[in-house]
Structure formats: C-alpha cells, structure tokens
Image (cartoon, rainbow, N blue to C red):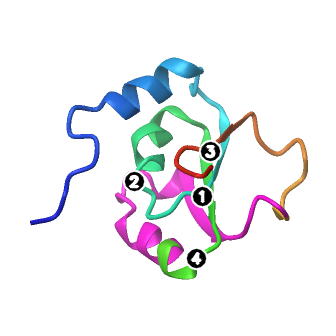
Amino acid sequence: MPRELDPHGVESQALLGATDFDGARVLEVGSGDGRLAFRYASASAFVVGIEPQLNQVRSALQACPSDLRPRITFAQATALAPPFRDDAFDIAVLAWSL
C-alpha cells in the first residue's frame, strides 16, 4: 500500500502560512514529482519546478492536474545553474531540497 505524505495537510498549511503566494511567480527547487507544487500552484501566477532527475520531471508532468497545467511547468535543471533571469521569480521554495 502506498504511503500518503502529509495526510493532514500540515506541510501545506505551514508553507501557505509562510508567505503570500497570491499572484506570485514561484520557483520550486528540487520539485521532485510535483506533489508540493500542486498544493500551492492555484494561488500563484505561475510555478516552475526544477529537478535534476529527469524521471522525476516526467512524473511531475504526468501527474499534473489538468486545471493546473496552464500555470505550472517542470524542467530538468539544478539550483547551481538555473536557466532563468535573476528577477524572473518572486518566491523560491526549497522544501525537502536541503
């Protein structure tokens, strides 16, 4: 039986309470399978999740709910060499990445 991560939404509550995602441009570093990004993407202007492991990027793209697809994307990249301008994002999320 698969293990459900954060079944009570504690992680989501803590993240959403830490900053205002409303209309923000968000970069998630180490986005993995997208599980966390899916929780705050609807409040954001857009989300870009970067992940060094291509299989995780593919999993995130496949698992992305259809209603979030216009505002969320995933790419294979690392935090050491992100392929974005310095001012491209308002918030950077590094949950489970350190």
Residue density around tag 3, few if under 14, some if 14–19, many if 20 or more, within 10 Å:
few
Q: Which mark is residue 30?
A: 1
Which of the two discs, 1 and 2, labels the residue nearer the N terminus? 1
Which of the two discs, 4 and 1, labels the residue nearer the N terminus? 1
Residue indicated by mark 2: 35
Outermost bottom residue:
55
Question: Which amino acid, mark 2?
Answer: Arg
Residue indicated by mark 3: 94
Residue 65 lies within the magenta run: yes
At mark 3, the secondary structure is: loop
Question: Which amino acid, mark 3?
Answer: Leu
Q: Looking at this view, is 55 or 47 the one in front?
A: 55
Which of the two discs, 4 and 2, labels the residue nearer the N terminus? 2
Question: Which amino acid, mark 4?
Answer: Gln
Q: CA distance from mark 3 to mark 1?
A: 7 Å
Q: CA distance from mark 1 to mark 2?
A: 11 Å
Question: Which residues are drawn in magenta?
Answer: 57-80
